[in-house]
Image (cartoon, rainbow, N blue to C red):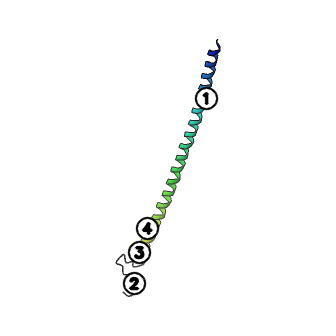
Amino acid sequence: MSRAAKLTLAGTSVMAAGIVVFVHYAQQSEKAAMHAGVIRDIEQQRVKKERQADFEMQQALEQEYRKIQQVHDGGGAGIADSGTG
C-alpha cells in the first residue's frame, strides 16, 4: 500500500470514529434534555393540581361563609352602611 493510501485510510478511519463518538454524545444530550422536559411537565401538573385543589377549597369555604353570613356584592355602599340595615 502506498503512503497516500495509508494516510487516506487512517484519516477516514479517525473521521468515522469521531463522527460515531459525536453522534453518541449528541444522542445522550438529547435524551437528557427530553427527560428534563418530562420532569418539568410532571412538576407543572403537580403545581396545577395543587392550585386547583386550593381554588376548590376556597370556593367551598366561600359557599359555607355565604350560608352563615349575609354578603352584599358590589354597589359601592362600603363597610359603613353594612351595620345600619
Q: Which of marks 1 and 4 precedes in the sequence?
A: 1
User: In the figure, residue 15 lies in which quadrant?
Assistant: top right
Could you tell me which residue is drawn at 57 percent across and 42 percent down? 32
Q: Which of marks 3 and 2 precedes in the sequence?
A: 3
Residue 33 coordinates in the image, percent (x, y): 55, 43
Mark 4 vs mark 2, foreground winner is: 2
Q: Which of marks 4 and 3 precedes in the sequence?
A: 4
Q: Please name the residue that numbered disc 2 is placed on.
A: 82
Q: Are marks 2 and 1 in contact (CB under 8 Å)?
A: no
Q: Are marks 2 and 3 in contact (CB under 8 Å)?
A: no
Q: Residue furthest front?
A: 4
Mark 3 Cα-neighbour bin, 10 Å: few <14, some 14–19, many ≥20: few
Q: Are marks 3 and 4 in contact (CB under 8 Å)?
A: no
Q: Residue furthest left?
A: 75
Q: Which of marks 1 and 3 precedes in the sequence?
A: 1
Residue 9 coordinates in the image, percent (x, y): 61, 19
Q: Which of marks 1 and 2 precedes in the sequence?
A: 1
Mark 2 Cα-neighbour bin, 10 Å: few <14, some 14–19, many ≥20: few
Local secondary structure at mark 3: helix
Q: Nearer the viewer, residue 10 or 58?
A: 10
Q: Please name the residue that numbered disc 1 is placed on.
A: 18
Could you tell me which residue is drawn at 36 percent across and 79 percent down? 76
Mark 2 vs mark 3, foreground winner is: 2
For the C terminus, the image quarter is bottom left
Q: Please name the residue that numbered disc 3 is placed on.
A: 66
Q: Amino acid at mark 4?
A: Gln
Q: From mark 2 to mark 1, how far is it between C-alphas?
A: 80 Å
Q: From mark 3 to mark 4, how far is it between C-alphas?
A: 10 Å
